[in-house]
Image (cartoon, rainbow, N blue to C red):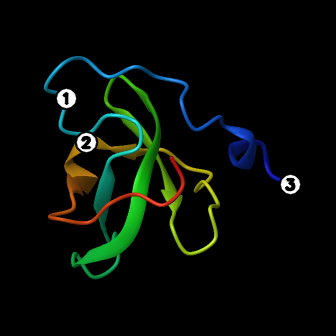
Amino acid sequence: MAEADTIPAREHTPARGDPLGVGTAVDVRSRYLGSWAQGFEVARRSGAAVWVRRLSDGSVLCEPLQLHEVRPAPNRPSRWS
C-alpha cells in the first residue's frame, strides 16, 4: 500500500466557510487535456496543497494538487468521509 493511501479521512479541520475542506466532493482538472474529471473528494489539505481520494475505490492519489487544480463538485455527496 502506498503511503498516500494511509492518510486518515479527517486529518485537517477546515476553516469555517472553506469550500475545499476535507470530505468535500471535488472535480479535478486533467493536466493533459485541461478538462475536469468527476469522482473525487478532498482527503487532506495543507495550505495550498490538496490530496484527493478517488471515490470509485477510495484510493488517495499520491501527488498533491494545487488549489487551481480542484473545484467543489456541484451537488455530489462524498462516499468515503
Q: Which mark is residue 73?
A: none
Q: Residues within 10 Å of mark 1 (few under 14, many from 20)?
A: few
Which mark is nearer the camera, 2 or 3? 3
In the image, residue 15 sits, relative to residue 51, either above or below, namely above
Q: Position of residue 3 (x, y in %)?
A: 77, 42
Tag 1's secondary structure? loop
> Total number of numbered labels?
3
- Kind of residue at disc 3: Met
Find residue 1 and report its image quarter: bottom right
Q: Relative to residue 35, is residue 23 depicted above or below?
A: above
Where is mark 3, residue-wise?
1
- Closer mark to the observer between disc 1 and disc 2: 1
State the residue in front, 12 or 78: 78
Mark 3 or mark 1: which comes first in sequence? 3
Location of residue 23 in the rendering, given as x and y in whole percent from the top left corner: 41, 43
- Left of 17 or right of it: where is 15? right
Q: Amino acid at mark 1?
A: Asp
Seen from the viewer's position, the closer of residues 16 and 70 is 16
Q: Position of residue 28 (x, y in %)?
A: 32, 64
On screen, residue 19 versus residue 41, left or right, reads: left
Residue positioned 20% across, 54% down in the render: 71
What kind of residue is marked 2? Leu
Q: Earlier in the sequence, mark 1 or mark 2?
A: 1
Mark 3 or mark 1: which is in front? 1
- Give how far across and how far down residue 54 sits, in percent: 52, 65
Work out whether residue 35 or residue 17 is closer to the camera in this orientation and state it.
17
Residue under circle 2? 67
Instruction: In the rendered view, tell whether residue 69 sits above or below residue 3.
Output: below
Query: Which residue position is annotated with label 1?
Result: 18
Separation of residues labelled 2 and 3 (CA atoms): 26 Å
Report helix, strand or loop for mark 2.
helix
Residue drawn at (32%, 74%) of the image: 38
